[in-house]
Image (cartoon, coloured by chain):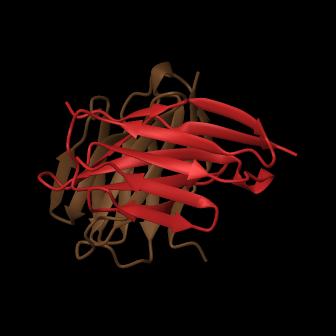
Chain colours: A brown, B red
């Protein structure tokens, strides 16, 4: 079984809809991240969490929110989706005790906003 | 703002050829990581370089960290179709516990 899972894998939605992307991990890592990937732009950090009570904005947090429900679960919400949020979204985890910090990625969610 | 510039963005070569991918910044990083991503999957770590001037080899792949820890290169010898993928470099900023990512190099090796 995969260590980092994301649901759904693909989602098509309409402008204005609320969308939640979910991430679960079995690696026992404290740190979790949400990134979006766009062609030619690489990975951009949306939010990150170093433990259940610690949530931090990343480079591009506007239009997104997150919830860390448990050590193993970190969800990303788009409150009112817009077409330029069409992208590939990745969840990642890392171990607090690991330096430098290797990140382990889920398989991604491809989101299309019409 | 710390940036990592990768070049080239896209490279398509024949099997057996050699190639080098570059990752450059004006900032100093504590370490630099190289990841490889295949379609439909997330990036997977290939190597981490930590010390200025460090060279690491992974079979036909050679990774080098610049002396000043601002740049890195990935050299592939005798490329094979199985090397096809998106190669990403990421610099570790220890002050805020974040990785700064390059935009990636899409590599296609034709049989």
A109 or A94: which is nearer to us? A94
Q: What residue do we see at 61% from left, 50% from top?
A: A9
* B55 horizontally vs B16: left or right: left
* B53 horizontally vs A56: left or right: right
Q: What residue do we see at 51% from left, 73% from top?
A: A3
Q: What residue do we see at 37% from left, 65% from top?
A: A102
View extreme (right): residue? B111
B79 or B96: which is nearer to us? B79
Give the answer, above or below, for where A60 lies relative to B101: above
Image quadrant containing the N terminus of chain B: top left
The quadrant in which residue B27 appears is top left
Visible residue check, residue A8: no
Give the answer, above or below, for where A14 lies relative to B81: above
Residue B28 position within the rendered picture, expressed as x and y whole percent measured from the top left: 20, 44
* B28 horizontally vs B3: left or right: left
The quadrant in which residue A75 appears is bottom left
Residue B24 position within the rendered picture, expressed as x and y whole percent measured from the top left: 36, 36
Count up the numbered dots: 0
* A14 horizontally vs B52: left or right: right
Q: What residue do we see at 66% from left, 40% from top?
A: B107
Give the answer, above or below, for where B29 lies relative to A31: above
Visible residue check, residue A42: yes
Residue B15 position within the rendered picture, expressed as x and y whole percent measured from the top left: 81, 47
Residue B17 position within the rendered picture, expressed as x and y whole percent measured from the top left: 74, 44
């Amino acid at each position: 079984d995969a260590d980092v899972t994301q649901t759904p894998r693909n989602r098509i939605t309409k402008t204005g809809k609320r969308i939640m992307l979910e991430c679960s991990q079995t690696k026992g890592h404290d740190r979790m991240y949400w990134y979006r990937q766009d062609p030619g732009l690489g990975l951009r950090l949306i939010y990150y969490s170093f433990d259940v009570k610690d949530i931090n904005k990343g480079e591009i947090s506007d239009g997104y929110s997150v919830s860390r429900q448990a050590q193993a679960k970190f969800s990303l919400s788009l409150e009112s989706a817009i077409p330029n949020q069409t992208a590939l979204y990745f969840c990642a985890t890392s171990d607090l005790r690991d330096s430098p910090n290797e990140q382990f990625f889920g398989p991604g969610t491809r989101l299309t906003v019409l | 703002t710390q940036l990592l510039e990768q070049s080239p963005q896209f490279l398509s070569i024949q099997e057996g050829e050699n190639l080098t991918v570059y990752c450059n910044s004006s900032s100093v990083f504590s370490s630099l990581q190289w990841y490889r991503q295949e379609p439909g999957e997330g990036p997977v770590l290939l190597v981490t370089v930590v010390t200025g001037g460090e060279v690491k080899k992974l079979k036909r792949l050679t990774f080098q960290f610049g002396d000043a820890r601002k740049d890195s290169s990935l050299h592939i010898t005798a490329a094979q179709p199985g090397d096809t993928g998106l190669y990403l470099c990421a610099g570790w900023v220890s002050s805020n516990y974040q990785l700064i990512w390059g935009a990636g190099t899409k590599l296609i090796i034709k049989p």
